[in-house]
Image: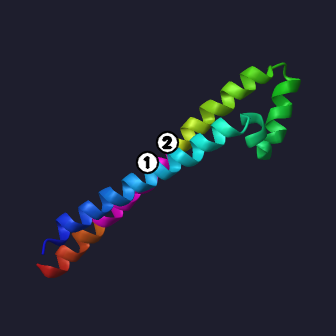
Amino acid sequence: MNWSRGTLRLWIVISIIWVISVIFYYDTINNIIDPIEAHKFEQEKTEAARKAGYTDIEITQYLRKTSIIETLEYGFIPPVFLLLAGLTARWILRGFIR
């Protein structure tokens, strides 16, 4: 039994499931709900942008762009950290074996 190959394959499967679920979650929010309504927790920023003279279209474009960035952050950073943690654990365990 090859633990290195098995854990790498497990990481690949978990990462693919994670990325697909994050993309599905954020895509659903952005397509079903109006971005201004979806980001009600940023209501203060939206109101400040309106007072500064930005239109709802510009605010919506900004919120969609930040949503794409959040999707990339939440989708790809955790699998990379999981891979690094696994590689670090493997390095530590190999030090005890030798």
What is the three-letter code of the residue carrying label 2?
Leu
Residue 41 rendering spot, x and y as whole percentages = 78, 47
Q: As displayed, is residue 78 above or below residue 67? A: below
- Could you say which disc has been placed on residue 98 in the image? none
The residue lying at 45 percent from left, 55 percent from top is: 18
> What residue sits right under mark 1 in the picture?
76
Q: Is residue 64 left or right of residue 12?
A: right
The residue lying at 12 percent from left, 75 percent from top is: 1
What range of the chain is rendered magenta?
A: 72-87
Quadrant of image for the C terminus: bottom left
> What residue sits right under mark 2 in the picture?
72
Colour mode of the rendering: rainbow
Question: What secondary structure is marked by label 1?
Answer: helix
Judge whether residue 96 is colored magenta: no
Specify whether residue 80 is in view: no
Residue 32 rendering spot, x and y as whole percentages = 68, 39
Q: As displayed, is residue 49 above or below residue 21? A: above
**Chief secondary structure of the magenta portion:** helix
Nearest the viewer among 71 and 25 is 25
Question: What secondary structure is marked by label 2?
Answer: helix
